[in-house]
Image (tube, rainbow, N blue to C red):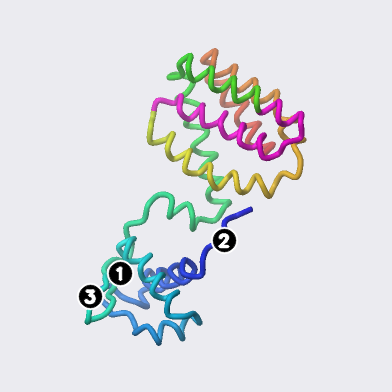
Amino acid sequence: MLKRKSLAEQVADRIRLHIKAGDYALGMKLPAEPELMNTFGVGRSTIREAIKILVNSAFLDVRQGVGTFVTCVVGRESLFDKFERANLLDVVEVRHLLEMRIAEKAVLNRKNEHLEKMEAALVERYKYAKEGDVVAAIKADVNFHQAIADACGNNILAELYRASSVYVVESFMQQFADTSSFLLTHELHEMLCLGIKQQDSKRTLSVLKQIITVV
């Protein structure tokens, strides 16, 4: 199931929105804790934890004995933070765009070790799909596509894909009640692997588009 945010994370998100909207302007001192507690309807410990989250991401600065001030309106958030707050549909869209570019490059740059990982993941994907093990089939599917990403020759693309996988797995866990979809698309995945192996770019991208449409 999708990870639920803590109350402090939810409050941090709301304060972040106020900062980006200009309600808490750059250089402005945040209201005192009691006012923030009243505004967001939470306790002191939650406010303090939310402030800590925003300090760590560079939105706020706590000056002892003076107060808490807005130091940045864009923050310094990690890629995982951005994925964490993103709409799942946006994550899926980014993932599909990544897949197309990754497949193009994997066709050109794949090595035997990458092909071996793809083929091994495909064997596991089919095995678990036949057994009806949804969780294991999802993990094998992710391993297959990550092997393609690792074969593309661009470490940044591969890491972006790995980061998105965390959230797509959560979506798949909700989306698939059984493994019928994995069985249905098994032949397409074999064709995708073969296209990359044979370095056939046109075939590879055509098959990948079909997979994306089905899923």
Helix, strand or loop at disc 2?
loop
Would you call the spot at circle 2 few (<14 residues within 10 Å), some (14-19), or many (20 or more)?
few
Is 70 or 132 nearer to us in this picture? 132
Q: Position of residue 108 (x, y in %)?
A: 44, 19
Say left or right for 166 vs 184: left
Q: Which residue is mark 2?
A: 4
Would you call the spot at circle 3 few (<14 residues within 10 Å), some (14-19), or many (20 or more)?
few
- Determine whether 105 is above or below 135 in the image: above
Query: What amino acid type is highlighted by mark number 1?
Result: Leu
Magenta residue span: 125-153
Query: What amino acid type is highlighted by mark number 2?
Result: Arg
Query: What amino acid type is highlighted by mark number 3?
Result: Arg
Residue 192 picture quarter: top right
Residue under the image location 49 percent in, 55 percent down:
84
Q: Position of residue 109 (x, y in %)?
A: 43, 19
Q: Which residue is mark 1?
A: 60
Residue 37 picture quarter: bottom left
Q: Which residue is mark 3?
A: 63
Helix, strand or loop at disc 1?
strand
Q: Of the residues under marks 2 and 1, which one precedes in the sequence?
A: 2
